[in-house]
Each structure stands twice: as C-alpha cells, then as structure tokens.
Image (tube, grey):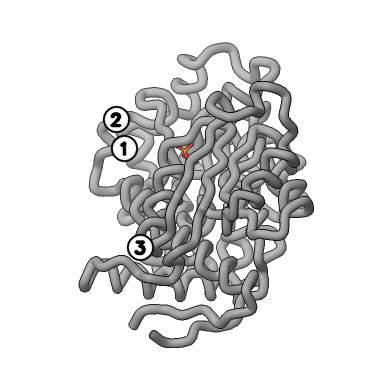
Amino acid sequence: MSQSPTWNRKDLIDVEPLDRAEIETIFTAALAFKQAMETDNKKQPLLDGRTVVNLFLEPSTRTRLAFEVAANRLSADTITVTSEASSLTKGETLRDTARNMEALKADIIVMRHAASGAPNYLSKVVDIPVINAGDGSHAHPTQALLDAFTLIEKLGPLDGKKITILGDILFSRVARSNIACLQRLGADVTVAGPSTLVPKRFETMGVTVSHQLEAALAKADAVMLLRIQHERQTATHFPSIGEYTSMFGLNKARAKWLKPGAIIMHPGPINRGVEIDSELADSGQSVILQQVTNGIVIRMAVLHLCHCAQHGQSPQLPG
Ligand code: CP
C-alpha cells in the first residue's frame, strides 16, 4: 500500500467547491483501484467492518448499484434504503431517519433525493460522512467525476478540450456538476439545445451557449447527451418529444458533423430514439458503458477518501 495526496473532506456534496488538486486526488485513487481490479480483481480491505447505507429516495440504477459494488469491493457491508420501504412514508423526518442510521452504527450515508440541498442538510445533522448521489437539479458530483475520468482516459488532459453538453441543461444536475468539474480541469464547455432548455443565462457560468446544433457538434472533442428530465419539469418546454428529436436528437446524419475521433457520452438512463439513436448509443464512438464501469472506481475513491478524512487517517492505495 502506498500513500496518496491529502484529502480533508468528510462529505462530498458538490463538485463546485473542489479545486483541481482535490479532483486529481480522487482520480489518482480511482486509477489505483482500477489497476488493482484489472490485475488481481481482489477486494480491498479498506472499509472492512464498516457499513455503508445507500439512502436512495429517488429512483436510480447506475448510481445506486455502482455505490453498492464500490462499497463491497472495499469490503464494507451495505444496506439500501428506499422511500417506499422506510418509515419516511409514515411521516418520519429525514433528520430522524438519518440520526437513526447513525444510531444503528452506519459509517457512511450515500444519499439521492429529489430535493436540491437535501444531502447538504443531512451533512449538518449527522457526524458521519454524507455523499451526494444526486439531489434535485442541483448536483451529481460522482457522475461528473466519472465523466471527467472517462474523458481523460479517452482524450488525455482536458486543458483546452472542447466538450459539448447537449439536451435538457436547465433541469440537469449532471450538467451543473459537469460544467464545474470540466472547467476546473481546463476544458472549454459548450451547452446546447433548445433555448427554452438552454437559456442564455448559463453564460454567467463561463460556458458558451449554443442553439445551433451543427456548430456545437462540429467543434466538440466529446459530446455529452442528456435526456429530457420530465420528472423535474412543471411545464412543457417544447411542443412534443418528436419535435425535440427532429431538432436536437443525435442521429447518424448529424453525427457526421462531429470531428473524426470525437466521442459520444451519456450519463444514462438513455431514451433511445429521443436524444440519441440506438445505433449511435451502441457504436464504437460511444463510451457510455465505460462511463458506468468507471463509476465503480470513482465511488471507491470517494468512499475511501471521505472515510479517511472522517477518521484522520491517510488514504491507503493499492500498488
Ligand atoms: N446517471 C445516473 O445517475 O443514473 P441513475 O439515475 O440510474 O443512477
């Protein structure tokens, strides 16, 4: 085991406050876990005897399973709690739910919630680490980290690289976290889509706003597609799904506007035939499933680093 650079945060609520060195510390740990998995595929003993609670109060496939796999690969025990199967349905508060988890000797809470700010609130009412697995339209820090980690694997350092995020930017926590993370790593970010879902005010975040699909695709080293977040929209922002697809869906003809070697990303879940054609999602240009696999080692890194910060320990990495 070798030492890794310092990490002082017990919680990961957002990617926004992280500096480049902190993001690179997560990547160093993730890479060490990835190399260890590829060589001997053994579990790491770093969270042996610890319990990770996955408190998922909004649906999830990739994030919940990747946190569960990551915790298991670090030798932790895992418990998954969903809103339907908890006493939240009987009126118990989030604070009481979390404090009961702490009383039951949970060591880390991983939380997804429909309300922006819920994980931040939770981190103030419990002493154990809280990791945000996506809150409302606010932040999805581990998604942004795994996306950037995958981009670096494919494109090398991101300084000056042009990344286009295409789709429902307005309601997307993935877009907000990716903008912050990619900018911290030196990338040049464009957000694209219909003006109702990609308002000009996003320019205040330092990104280019584009409503011209061809131009936004032609300059991109990578395009990241986002689905329409119906669950967070209170009004329609375009006439119909069919019209959205006809204007902004990525199909084979429009993919020709991309540079040779440009990669296609999507955080999932994909709505095939809406924001992306099936053939493209499954093509050699797509790294969608590689993003999912990298989600394991990014979450191993975050769980390990936050646990070490909580206990005043130095991170221990394989290799
Ligand atoms: N990318 C993502 O957050 O997917 P899930 O909603 O399935 O976790």
x%, y% of residue 276? 38, 31
Q: Amino acid at mark 2?
A: Ser
For the residue with label 1, is its CB less than 8 Å from the closest atom of ligand 1?
no
Judge whether residue 190 can be spotted in this image: no
Task: Identify the image quadrant of the N terminus.
Answer: bottom left
As rendered, which of 178 and 285 lies closer to the eye?
178
Q: Amino acid at mark 3?
A: Lys
Q: Which residue is mark 3?
A: 154
Residue drawn 73% across the image and 39% down it? 96
Judge whether residue 240 can be spotted in this image: yes
206 left or right of 174 in image:
right
Residue drawn 45% across the image and 47% down it? 223
Q: Which residue is mark 1?
A: 281
Q: Which residue is mark 2?
A: 278
- Residues under numbered marks 1 and 2 in contact, where contact means CB atoms less than 8 Å apart: yes
For the residue with label 2, is its CB less than 8 Å from the closest atom of ligand 1?
no
- Mark 3 and mark 2 lie on one chain; the one further toward the N terminus is 3
Q: CA distance from mark 1 to mark 2?
A: 5 Å
Q: Residues within 10 Å of mark 1 (few under 14, many from 20)?
A: many
Q: Secondary structure at mark 1?
A: helix
Residue 78 vertical position relative to residue 118 in the rendered view, above or below = below
